[in-house]
Amino acid sequence: MVGFLNALVVFLNFVFVPALAYGSQLALGALGVTLIYGILRFSNFAHGDTMAFGTMVTILITWWMQGVGISFGFLPTALLALPFGIVITGLALLGTDRGVYRFYRQQKADPVILVIVSMGVMFIMNGVVRFVIGVDDINFADGTRFIITAREFQELTGLQEGLALRTTQVLTVVTAAIAVALLFWFLNKTRTGKSMRAFSDNEALALLSGINPERVVAVTWLIVAALATTAGVLYGLDKSFKAFTYFQLLLPIFAAAIVGGLGNPLGAIVGGFVVAFSEVMVTYPWRRVLSHLLPEERMPDGLVQLISTDYKFAVSFIILIIVLLFRPTGLFKGKSV
Amino acid sequence: MSDNPYQDGRGNKDASITNRAGMGQIEYRPEGEARPAGPGPFLIGEAMTGGYGTGANILNDCTISVEKGEIAVIVGPNGAGKSTAMKAIFGMLNLRGGSVRIDGEDITALSPQARVPKGMAFVPQTSNIFTSMTVEENLEMGAFLRRDDISTTMEQVYGLFPILRDKRQQAAGELSGGQRQQVAVGRALMTQPKVLMLDEPTAGVSPIVMDELFDRIIEVARAGITILMVEQNARQALEIADKGYVLVQGANAFTGTGAELLADPEVRRTFLGG
Amino acid sequence: MTLPIRNLVLFGLMALLILITGVVQGWTLALTIVNMGLISAIMALGVNLQWGFAGLFNVGVMGFVALGALGAVLVSMPPTTAAWEAGGVRVLLGLAMGAATIVAAVQVHKRMAPGRTRTIVIIAVLVVGFFLYRAVFDPGAAAVEAVNPTLTGYLGGLGLPVILSWPVGGLLAAGAGWVIGKTALGLRSDYLAIATLGIAEIIIAVLKHEEWMSRGVRNVSGIPRPVPLEVDLQRDPDFLERAASLGLDPIFASTLTVRLAYMALFAIVLLVLLWLAQKALNSPWGRMMRAIRDNEVAAEAMGKDVKGRHLQIFILGSAICGMAGAMMATLEGQLTPSSYLPLRFTFLVWVMVIVGGSGNNFGAVLGGMLIWWLWVMVEPIGLWLMTVITAGMPDGSWLKLHLTDAAAHMRLFTMGMILLLVLRFSPRGLIPEK
């Protein structure tokens, strides 16, 4: 029995909690991608860099706050800076839409042209982020590091294994849950949210109902700014901020959005967790879990790791292929917000 | 391939990066102003000439008008530009000549969405409902521009189409063809329009449903809403029409009351099959 | 292959840019740019084949290029005999078992009737196969990697002439292209973009971590060269005599000779590929490809095998990218997996194709040369710009340091700007398709 509990604690500590936090971050990222796909009708290659941009702005504000002595008690200061980061990122995205994307909408450009346009935006945003904050690893988490440390947990429960809960992990899951709840309430209950769904479903008919496409698009960019900045800041708090890592998040985020069914917000969330859990579980060395469950003589040699951590990208990709083979439109039917 | 280089997607239809479902086909046009116009018919598209994009003219000096509370019907052979004439009145293509006026205002320069608050409602022939949304949400979206209480209008629509009340929480895309048409008309009525424009409302529905729909349309007209309709089933449509237009190659061929056109031997011979 | 005046002028201007670089910054740099520009032009040619001719969206160019580079190692490096003895056979056996597992699973999928039993059997085959593969393969790889890790620690190559690796690199990339195309184009709707994005990352991960094959992040260097070494030339009395007769410094003359030799090799490959691509474009096959692109429904109705054609052109384009990768590894003389970044090897090639002109082979070549030149030159230009801007600031000021450091990052910003400006104001590119 104690062996089982110990195994469970190891599982929670090294698999479940990290995957839950990572999944929340991916889900928020994938929601942004799926919204753009549903309403602007293209996959935004600049999304990873939008996350990096939002995080960069938030970090700069956090530094300023820390400089003048503002803090958020045991929570990271970045959380206080987040709303400002969202606003500035929102303005930047609206500006980008004004200066870049709107022209193509007026031309009724083919979506694939918009994909290429988003590559250009990606280059520029990537350049801006590197220009302003550089390419180094930046750790901007402050406040209390742990809600409960492994040692405290061991003393509390008397178990051999410890469960450490980092503040950022709990924060990530809670913030993501709030953001998702707000988004769903907005899309399903408010007039503007419903008009966004209508626009995604049938653009021409939305126009004939008097829905202003420019307004729908503007609101979409603002929501995307909020989601991307939140996702980016949470990821940065949980791990650290590095411009290149954020660019690389594009693949798991796209995979999550597609696994769930592109254009479907619920799918994006489920997809985020599917990708995160499979990535963590397949690359985790299970030896330590097994050591509490199996008698010594039956323990296998080696780490009992299915695939080396180096191939975590491969996992999201293989999940993607498997899902698409069996459900061509993703787990949830895609292509409508 | 299109002449517009921005519309040239090189045949790419990669589902992981592009979403073509529900893309609008309505051309972009800069926002224009409505101007006051002299007296005339309640709604008129006068001497309209134009086509889609930079393509050839489909309409040639075509005039369609309708008085308040009347039913006007546009009929004609395939490819005569019936639907195009209707879309031109709603501002869905750029006119190269002619004007559109409603209730003493010249609205030629207005975009389609700006014509909705002027009291016009349009039911396209296809893709005329929000398939992923519930029936009730469809009706709500129809009333998007209204800031007042919409429940009375919604009750009226449910009164007109009782089946929709039972299915109001169901996704509109799951309904049968006839029910979808009812949702489409209901959505258009939610704006409380002065003019209801219907593009082949009976296309693809069974004869029984068709008769039922025509009855409802007459009911709507009796409530004082002007109706402009394009129809394939010329005979039935002309029977309920106060005014009929026969178009041939984008131009007016015959005009008269519904009864006159039904009686006209030339019209009977060429369009109504004897 | 006739060029209209406008295109000749554009290529002339490109040559002029190179000349100016040569005069201002030296011929060594100018020739370095030309050589990499030629390789970039070949990559652009490959992507243009896929996107320009068939509208296929490949965002995994990096992976194909890297596979080609791996080809250069596998063909030309000397075999590590000790490593082969230690575990080479075991590694090959393991790989064969892995492949056999996949083939068996596919066969089960084909032969058995659909249903739960089939799914269970497939999963069983895959799971058993996976553990057998790991059991055979892992010790072999470990043994290979243990052989003199500071110098080798990998199986090495076949020790064949490096030029042979160019077609082999192309073949490797074509093989990967076949697998990806078969999978992604075979799904009910087309998911090529995400598939290529994923595969490219996986290929790089394999190169970085399968040390028995590519030495991973410890890199393979010293790939044999198809041209003589500079030091050998400097020792050659004939060469020294000729250099002296031309009034050139022997070291400079040897560098120049080597680069010119590379340039000649690359130019020959580029011209052959360009000629083939033009031939293909104007052949019935090319016309059919464009017919499919412009109206897939009509082409399908006429009985054209759209998926098959797409697969064909995707494989061809991938092969060209792989070839370019092998040539690049030859030029650099090494394989450095960690230097393969998507912005540099995937998205930059896209900028080349779009700027040059989608669907036009000459456009792709011009775009490849021009964008590569810019990619190299933006940094010195940016640095110069920053020096001018910060001239008035006191030395050692925070902003001055930051701006000077940040000049390096101007590169990405500029590439984005160029892409957006061309898309906006000249959407068909510098040399439009027609």
Image (cartoon, helix red, strand yellow):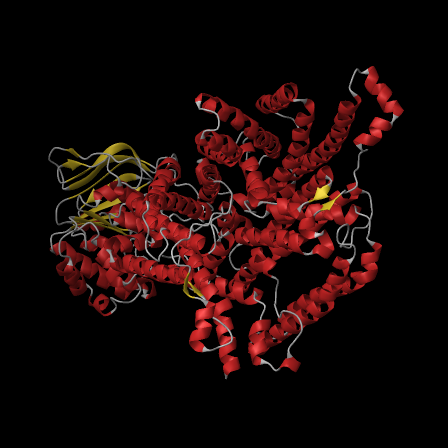
Horizontal side of C149 relative to C47 (left or right) equals right
Judging depth in this view, the residue of B208 and A205 nearest the camera is A205
Q: Position of residue C352 (x, y in %)?
A: 57, 35
**Furthest residue to the right?**
C237
Q: Is residue A13 visible?
A: yes
Image quadrant assignment for residue C398:
top left
Residue C404: x percent and y percent?
50, 30
Residue occupying image coordinates x 56% and y 27%: C380
Give how far across and how far down residue C409 sits, in percent.
Answer: 51, 35
Q: Nearer the viewer, residue A330 or C4?
A: A330
- Looking at the picture, does residue C370 appear above or below residue A251? above
Residue B21 seen in the current view: no
**Residue at the spot x=25%, y=60% of the render?**
A189
Q: Quadrant of residue C210?
A: bottom right
How many marks the image carries: the answer is 0
Percent from the top left, x then y, of residue C181? Answer: 61, 54
Q: Compared with residue C197, is residue C125 higher up or lower down, i.e. above or below?
A: below
Quick check: C48 left or right of A121? Answer: right
